[in-house]
Amino acid sequence: MKTALALPARLLGRAPRVNLVRLQGMIAAQGRGRLSDADLAPVLERAFRAGKPKAVALLINSPGGSPVQSSLIAARIRRLAGETGVPVHAFVEDAAASGGYWLATAADDIHADPCSILGSIGVIFAGFGLHELIGKYGVERRVHTAGRSKSQLDPFRPEKPEDVEHLNHLLEQMHTAFIAHVRDRRGDKLQGAEDLFDGSFWLGHEAVRLGLADGIGHAVPVLKERYGEKVRLVPYGIKRPFLARFGMALTADALAAAEERALWARLGV
């Protein structure tokens, strides 16, 4: 009686592998739970190289944040994709808005849920004017600088027209860079109107119609359809500090959470 020999797994051929990277939260250089280029660098490096993946899938759920960090992260994704030849797919969950959409456009294609929010291609600066408030309490603001513009946009002093003009000039430059990136990545898929870049945002089907996304679909079924039912989906992400897992955050983290909550609220989420 003959006994069948067990063949090594390498000879049988393994199921294709797709590495998943979760990009969730506000985009900022600092702060626990934030998305930053420094924190994501090792995660993305592993995702593009570990296990010879057939693709990398980005699971995006972000209301935006820092334009610089958005640009750095997106550039890193494109650089790694070019070095490895690995295609990149983006799947939007609640939102890929503002900087979150910047990250989504680093992918070769974008899928979303019908209720996902996409877009918000604009730049915002927000603050408070508190000079009248402190005046009511007899508080005098004293500021001494070397450099005429060193104290511009101080919330405890009256706003100066020249400071606002300078700020608007900076915001326009950032907006221009954002638009250039979207046009470069989405190309002829975009359906025309300049309204795409006025800061508006849309839900899934409308985003597809406008060329901001390529289709409606969720990560698992889309990836199975593309790479086969036996595709192996391997998750990667930023590890949270030990104490943060038990909700033991500092005051700074509470303030960061409030700031992120405000970004989500702007989208009605």
Image (spheres, grey):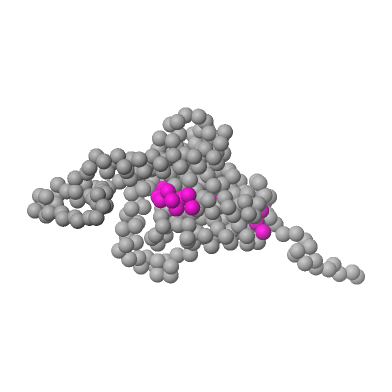
Residue 3 coordinates in the image, percent (x, y): 86, 69
Residue 119 in view, yes or no: no
* Residue 127 forms part of the magenta stretch: no
Residue at the spot x=41%, y=55% of the render? 28
Q: Quadrant of residue 216?
A: top right
Q: Residue furthest right?
A: 1
Which residue is at the front of the view, 67 or 241?
A: 67
Q: Residue at x 59, y 54 (%)?
A: 80
Along the horizontal axis of the image, is 88 left or right of 103?
right
**Residue at coordinates 58% horizontally, 48% vertically from top-left?**
89
Residue 106 % position (x, y): 54, 47
The residue that appears at 57% across and 55% down in the rendered structure is 20
Residue 117 vs 43, above or below: the answer is above
Q: Which residues are magenta?
A: 52-72
On the question of residue 6 being in view, the answer is yes
Quarter holding the C terminus?
Answer: top left
Give percent across and percent down for residue 74. 51, 50
Say which of 86 and 96 sits in front.
86
Query: In screen coordinates, is 85 left or right of 168?
Result: right
Name the residue nearer the viewer: 237 or 69: 69
Q: Give the camera-side residue of 119 and 3.
A: 119
- The stretch drawn in magenta includes residue 53: yes
Q: Quadrant of the N terminus?
A: bottom right
Specify whether 240 is left or right of 84.
left
Farthest top residue? 193
